[in-house]
Image: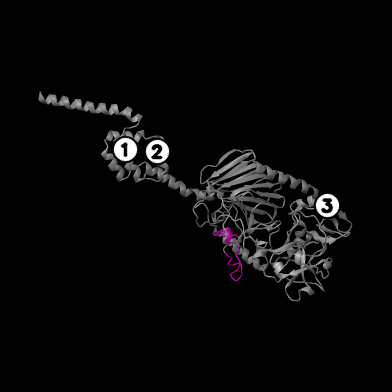
Amino acid sequence: MRLRILPIGGWVWLALAGVLSAQEPADPPARVARLNYLDGWVSFRPGNLQEWAPATLNFPLTTGDHLWADREARAELHIGATAIHLAPWTAFAIMRLDERVAQLSVAEGTMYLRIPRLDEDDVVEVDTPNGAVSVLRPGDYRVDVDPGNDATSLTVRAGEAEVSGNGRITLVHAGQMLQLVANADVAGIMDAPPPDPWEDWCVGRDRLSERALEISESYVPAEMEGAEDLGAYGDWSTDSFYGAVWAPRNPPAGWAPYRCGHWAYVAPWGWTWIDDAPWGFAPFHYGRWVQAGFRWVWAPGNRVTRPVYAPAMVVFVASGAARNGKVTAWIPLAPGEIYRPNYRASERYIRRINLPNVKNGGDVTLTVVSYLNRTHGIAVAQDTFAGARPVAAGAVPITGSVKPVTVDASPTRESYLGRRTPAEGKVAAPPPLVTERAVIVRHELPPEVRPAAPIRGAVRPPESSPLSQPPQSNLPQTERPARREEAQPEAAPLVYLALPPERPQRRAETRYEAPSQRHEETRQEAAPPPPPRHEETRHEAPPQRHEETRHEAPPQRHEETRQEAAPPPPQRHEESRHEAPAPLPQRREESRPAAQSGRNEDKKDDSSSNSSRKK
């Protein structure tokens, strides 16, 4: 087997982590991937649900989430300053994403990766069915996975990468392309081919983002998801009280933060705001909003290298409009107000997430009882809130006194998917063989992606949840070219298993030792005399002719016989017996006079001996 079970030490580590988690709550990841561009049929499946839905712009993606770019579709994600582009017919998943590790997978299709920054302790890994790619330097990388030919290629335009697969670790430099084919013992490295039009499009997108980021990089760090959109859709200025602030250009009349969008439920954070604006990510997951000079401005706060992502910088409150228990209300937080998450988190996490918002090392544990933006609070019906429906259509102002509360709405299928099911019911979904295809991983998987189980089975909802029994869609899946369907391998229970990165050589030996032994046995079995049936064939023919047949067989035929399972199939032996009377090839014709002369000499010897006896 080419994949090995997580070693015992890994399970001990997980057990120890479970003991420590009982002492302090586990903090959610500090960063996410943002889906910032969609074109065509792009589908999304969360890690805790086995159902596909149309992907949503500005949706945060995390460990266990999947994307599928259908025919003529494109998608783009950002993890901080790192850009990820997906071509048509691409199956993409996030296997692990936290503050330092970005472990991605491509089971089919093409991905272009642009990494402008990479710290020494950062890990960027792309797992494919033929090998795991570890990025070593900032640069541009392209990964193509062809399931029809069981092949993967890595093209390094700039930078350097290390590929673990095919029994060895291979270093790929800038300007080179590495090809991995099935279980080949040797990985082929060649000069990188010229870019195609799709790759040119990816490069153009990256250049535009980097130019836009240059405008905002003086105010916010490049690792803030969505920072590249601020310079393109708004303007920066300096406020005498709040410092550097940003305002969107020409917002619609009546616009207010956390009003034009909807809510989704994204584990492990919980209720998450999804804004409709193309720039609507960074201003709603970092910093604070406030009215200054009759307009809304966003204050990012103190500059930090790696800001901590939040699902929404709001406080959920109970108000007069929520007395019947069927309304959910919230208030946008203003600068200086402390964010208290509704999900479990440690005090250290709360300090980190509020650090940009406090000045001179202020205390983040202070309780705020009055909110500056309280007059702009919003309340909606719970079915609108939990059903991923547009907030603006049903928003009403809050009334009476406000008090922070915990949201009591239960998530639904729509809130997990981040949007309502389309009325026409058409969703582009990959074939089952694509989602079940195993990939080779180098770094250990997190507990959410359990070893010995496909990714799609991770973090399933509890039995009592309405999501535990998702309905089976009766819609036909997206049509795919016949060539791809014919090239798919037979379905089999596949697993995603983690291997320790410090022992890649043992992993390579585990993967290829068994095939190598079988190959040696085949060669050794080909040398001894053939089985009894072949022996019968050998005794029926004259000794000289059998010897000629063994030595005059073409080398190509002999090589094929060595690669096939030993002994040769019975049909081939049957053909050998019936082909004996047939005319022999040219080489055999040249050797026949020698044999015939031998027989003539035998006859002469017999005649001479007979004549001597007569005498």
- Structural distance between the alpha carbons of marks 2 and 3: 74 Å
Q: Amino acid at mark 1?
A: Glu
> Mark 1: few, some, or many residues within 10 Å (few <14, many ≥20)?
few
Using the image as rendered, state which of residue 441 and residue 607 is in the foreground: 607
The residue furthest left is 615
**By what rule are the colours in the image chosen?**
one colour
| Residue carrying label 2 | 558
Q: Amino acid at mark 3?
A: Asp
Look at the numbered discs 2 and 1 and tell me whether their residues touch, using CB distance below 8 Å.
Answer: no
In primary-sequence order, the first of circles 3 and 1 is 3
Question: Which of the numbered marks, if any, corresponds to residue 235?
Answer: 3
Question: Measured from the top left, where is residue 288 in percent x and y?
Answer: 80, 60
Question: Measured from the top left, where is residue 574 in percent x and y?
Answer: 32, 43
SS under mark 3: strand
Question: Measured from the top left, where is residue 96 in percent x and y?
Answer: 63, 56
- Structural distance between the alpha carbons of marks 2 and 1: 17 Å
Quarter of the C terminus within the rendering: top left
Which region shows up in magenta?
449-471
Using the image as rendered, state which of residue 57 and residue 14 is in the foreground: 57
The stretch drawn in magenta includes residue 453:
yes
- Identify the residue at image location x=46%, y=48%: 515
The stretch drawn in magenta includes residue 140:
no
- Structural distance between the alpha carbons of marks 3 and 1: 87 Å
Using the image as rendered, state which of residue 170 and residue 113 is in the foreground: 113
The residue furthest bottom is 324
In primary-sequence order, the first of circles 2 and 3 is 3
Q: From this viewpoint, is residue 239 visible?
A: yes
